[in-house]
Every structure is written in C-alpha cells, then in structure tokens.
Image (cartoon, rainbow, N blue to C red):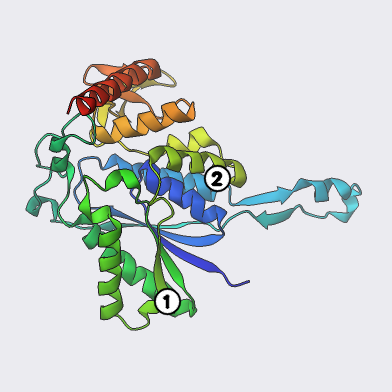
Amino acid sequence: MNKKYAVLSLSGGMDSSTLLLHLLNEGYEVVALSFDYGQKHKVELERATELIEYINQYSLWEDLGYLRQSANKSLNIPPVEYVKYFKVIHQIIKLDGLAQLLNSSLVEGGAEVPEGHYAEENMKDTVVPNRNMIFSSIVQAVALSIANKNNTECVIALGLHSGDHTIYPDTTEEFRQSCLNTFRIGNWDSDKVDYYTPYMETNKFGILEDGAKCCELLGLNFDEVYRRTNTSYKPIKHKVFTEGNIESEVWFSDYKSASSVERVEAFIKLGKKDAVQYADEYGPVTWEHVVSHVHSILENHEKETSNR
C-alpha cells in the first residue's frame, strides 16, 4: 500500500485540530503548518505545539499479549510495537512584520475584538485581509514539494466548515476552487496536489462529533486533546495558584467572543463539558456559568432573527 501524505494548516483551534485527528485516523502522514502572523490570540500556537506533543507520544502501542505468551522469561522476547498512526511533523511559520500592515481586530495593534453571535454585522471586524490566500500559497508549496520528493500525490487538508462562509469569504468553496486553479496554472506537476475539505458541509457540532469518534478510534483521551486547543479570539491571562501553592500566569479562553460562543454551543449539543478553562475580566468562571451565558446569546439571536 502506498503511503498517503497530507499537509494541514493547523491553527491550534478546534476545527483544524479535529481535522488532524481525522487525517491520522485515515492513515495519512501529516505535515502540520501553523502561522504566526501577529495574531492577538497567539496562545493558539502554544496549544498546537502541546497537542502535537501529546498525539506523538501515543503513536505506538505495545502488544503486551504477545509478551504474556512468552512466559519463559529466559527467552527475553521484547514486546512488539505497532504503529497506530504516523507521528506528526509540525512547523510554525513566522510572518514577521505583517501585523503592523494589516487592518483587523485579530492582529496586535488592531481594534477590540467584538463580542456576540457570529451572524452579527460587527463580526466582519475579525476578518484578516487575504489571510487564507497568504497561508495557501505556503501550504501549496510544501504540499507540491512533498509530492515531487516522494513521487506521489499529496492533499492539502483544510478545516473549513459551513459556519464560516457568511463572515469569511476566503473560506468558501468558490475561493478554494479559484485558489486551486491559480496554483495549477503557476506550477509544474500541480496535478499531484488536491484539496481535502471534509467539513465543508457541516458545522462546529459536526466537527466535534467527528473528533469524539476519532479520539476513540485512535485511543486518545477526548478531554486531553481538546484542552490543548484554543478557539477564543480574546484569550485572557490570570494569575492562579498551581500545585505546590506556586503563583503563575495561565491562559484562559473567553466565553463572549463569537468564536467561543460557537465552540461552547457545539459542546452543549454534544453533551460534553469543555476541558478548556474559561474566564472573564474578573477571573476564572465555571462551565455552568459559560453555558448559561451562551444560552442567553443564542436565545437573543433567535429572537432578533424571528423579528426581522
């Protein structure tokens, strides 16, 4: 069987992190690229690194049954290791100097990140001009290099989903196809590369459902995976006392920005508590408090929509 290759744009958020699990479960060898473009929520890069480290340590399992069958210890037969999935190669690409030139609330020096439901008009402030085109050109170059080096095909995996479309025009199928056509025109052997977007017809809830399934199939702990992701556009750092009564600064997710509201809604629908810690400007809050706030946001949005 030929080895399958994929290059993943890994933001450190829930969508692309789940797609990473999906690819591993499908048998791909994955190169994950994360981008430091001066985003305020740089904690997502830390979470992406932590997730890769967690996943890679469980890529093998030992056949202890084989060891038990070798009851005669004098034989000194070691346990047999099997590959569950390929270890992930992770690279953070730094785009130094870009943030100062961009107009977006998501980058350092930009306006305050708006709060509320994704469908609200002010959420357009969270668009980063041409972000996915910038990322795509780099991802395409890496994917084509892998394909040519191994004389095989390589897919570019994107965690795009249906909920993105109304706010982010560079996450639509039209944009993706146009981007691919440009890549085809500008590169030899570009037919070796294609896009893989399994979540285009689903939403955050559908993505999280797939994540739960993949965790089970890969033998990974659901909570340990998703505590190592960040969906918040307004992460908050608070001083807390850790084990040993040592004071340290810890990153928390907010629960009021649109990205966080959508994530919490998915966890509510799945019937699971989010392992990520949440806080507001006053300090850490309980999961019950987060759920109550998100319910009120969703109810208000539904009322406003029905009154239009």
Q: Can you give x and y, in whole percent of width and height, for residue 261 in the image?
A: 30, 30
**Residue designated by label 1:** 192
Image quarter of residue 284: top left
Image quarter of residue 269: top left
Quadrant of the rendering where the C terminus is positioned: top left
Q: Going from the N terminus, do you reach mark 2 or mark 1 first?
A: 1
The front one of 70 and 294 is: 294
Looking at the rendered structure, the secondary structure element under dot 2 is helix
Can you see residue 308?
A: yes
Q: Is residue 276 above or below residue 150?
A: above
Quadrant of the rendering where the N terminus is positioned: bottom right
Q: Can you give x and y, in whole percent of width and height, for residue 106 in the image?
A: 17, 42
Amino acid type of the residue tagged 1 in the rendering: Lys
Q: Residue at x 9, y 38 (%)?
A: 111
Amino acid type of the residue tagged 2 in the rendering: Cys
The front one of 232 and 163 is: 163
Q: Is residue 182 above or below residue 172?
A: below
Q: Can you give x and y, in whole percent of width and height, for residue 83 in the image?
A: 64, 57
Can you see residue 275?
A: no
**Residue designated by label 2:** 214
Q: Can you give x and y, in whole percent of width and height, for residue 66 in the image?
A: 82, 51
Left or right: where does residue 201 sit relative to residue 103? Answer: right
Q: Please rate how many residues cluster around mark 2, counting C-alpha atoms within 10 Å: few if below 14, some from 14 to 19, many from 20.
A: many
